[in-house]
Image (cartoon, rainbow, N blue to C red):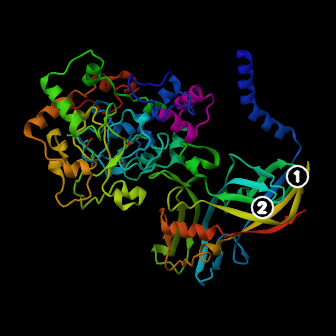
Amino acid sequence: MRFILHLLGALLILLPLTKVDLYAQQATGSVIIQLHHRVGERELEPDSAYKNSFGEQLIISRFRYYISNIEISDTVTRNTYRVSNQYFLVDEKDSGSKVLSLQLPAGQYNKISFLLGVDSLKNVSGIQTGALDPLRDMFWTWKSGYVMAKLEGRSSASTLPHHIFEYHIGGFNGAYNVLGRVELPLPAAIDIIPGKKVQVAVSADINKWFAGLHRLSIAEHPACTVEGQLAKRFSENYLQMFTIQSVSP
Amino acid sequence: MKQRIPEGFPRPVYDYRNNPLTREGFELGRKLFYDGRLSRDGYTACASCHQQFAAFSDFQHVFSHGADSRFTRRNAPPLFNLAWQKEFHLDGAINHLELQPLAPMTGQNEMNNTLDSIIARIKADAAYRKMFSSAFGSELVNTQRMLWALAQFTGNIVSADSKYDRVKKGKAAFNEWEQQGYLIFKERCADCHTEPLFTDLKYHNIGLAVDTFLNDFGRRDITGDKSDSLKFKTPSLRNISRTDPYMHDGRYWGLSTAIDHWQTRSASDTTADALILRGKPLEKMEVKYLVSFLHTLLDSSFLKDPMLADPVQGNMIHGPLQ
């Protein structure tokens, strides 16, 4: 009896592992998400000037954000593949960071979704490494927590010294939690088969930071670097910045 | 190496499950704690503001000197029994023991450095590379390993060998004043300064008027909640006779003033903790008894524990009388 109990215990422990193993053995295909940063219709280029919907000038010097907890799913079969424990720091300055390469089991999928930011759990779990290393300058050291997204630059509309604007958006709990899921239905279902690579081009429109759910002009809000209602509003705006541009093949 | 957990203490919050404790890791953490090169000016170590003989507070300083001659905004608290804390700093701004060092390392009025430059300095030092290798299996130096090592040291700064502890174990006895003091303590103080840690680890407003120069509203600045205004984390009273001056801004010298929150509270503050609003100031004799009792919380073996001392002799600050 005792032996059987032990065996059962061992099986229970092994069970989750075997599941992962099965995944590994299962032939997989890949989805490559390529992020394209834009302002309105125009692709973002270094040191160029753009205008937001308020007609305010924008010169962007830094644009970075975290993507995590990606899910690729099929809304018909409810089949969902979760990319666990992978954190991507997307940085306008680093073209490699704009390509998110995912391996997933064969099957049909018609939706991509992800968390914009670093989930609350990782915000309270001590020192992390890789994309989550505080060295990446996306962590508040005076009050623990990740900056989920950063947008910095200059604008003639800004009243701050040197006409800078600076948005560091964070807050992982309470009323001003800025975390939100971005849901991107694919224009048509994709078939993942072994060895196949599907490219999904996603565009992120920076104009939405200012003109999304809320109207937030640079003249009125040249900076937001702490948690709170304004940060929450910026997040509600930027959560709308993503759209699927194309899927191939 | 085993985590130091005194008899009678609750289970620690920080337990090294994700950061396996080794003697090598602890020694690396100790070296980092005492190393001034972690700061921009090369002189300000953690230990500059947290000195062992002062129970790892800053001896007789209201505010501490950071790198490049700047001052901290708060009185440096003593450091011990940190593995039992869920939150750090007097307002609870930091949510994890491993993350805490990031604040002083990058704080302009503390060590005023950047992580890049700290890591570059460590990497350039062969002795450090060797220590990282013995602690973590390879010479890789990164933020995570550095902070894991620091947590192996700071989490094992443990104080639980005072006269009070010996009395509790039946190995010593309070004298009459101490005993009187302990009884008053249990009645008037223990709700907040709860045994055995001598803190409930919660935030309270004891009615101290805000310093209009510092404008430090404590917990409120972290939660954004008005009802948290002027709340500060209850400090432990262990080793309290060594950590003069007192309160978050070091406004009081001497225990007799610091312990009578009913005397020091501002009459106009109606938002202070109910225990403070309702209670009455301590009698003269009660103060004397309490102070006697508080002296039994001094853990002199901890203040001299060679395991916690500067690994490089003569490197740093010496005892109170230089």
Q: Nearer the viewer, residue B278 or B306?
A: B278
At which x and y percent is residue B107?
42, 51
User: Which secondary structure lies at badge 2?
Assistant: strand
Subunit ID for the residue under disc 2: A
Query: Magenta span covers which residues?
Result: B123-151
Specify the farthest residue to the bottom: A55
Q: What residue does disc 1 label?
A: A107
At which x and y percent is residue B167?
25, 20
What secondary structure prevails in the magenta region? helix
Q: Nearer the viewer, residue B179 or B18?
A: B179
Q: Which image quadrant: the C terminus of chain A? A: bottom right
The lab-note entry on whether marks 2 and 1 share a chain reads: yes
Q: Is residue B31 visible?
A: yes
The residues bearing labels 2 and 1 have C-alpha atoms spaced at a distance of 21 Å
Q: Amino acid at mark 1?
A: Gly
Q: Which image quadrant: the N terminus of chain A? A: top right
From the viewer's perspective, is residue A93 above or below residue B44?
below
What residue lies at 61% left-to-right and 53% top-to-bottom? A118
From the viewer's perspective, is residue B10 above or below residue B279?
above
Subunit ID for the residue under disc 1: A
Q: What residue does disc 2 label?
A: A34
Q: Kindly check if marks 2 and 1 are in contact, taking CB atoms under 8 A apart as contact.
A: no
| Badge 2 or badge 1: first in the primary sequence | 2
Q: Is residue B60 visible?
A: no
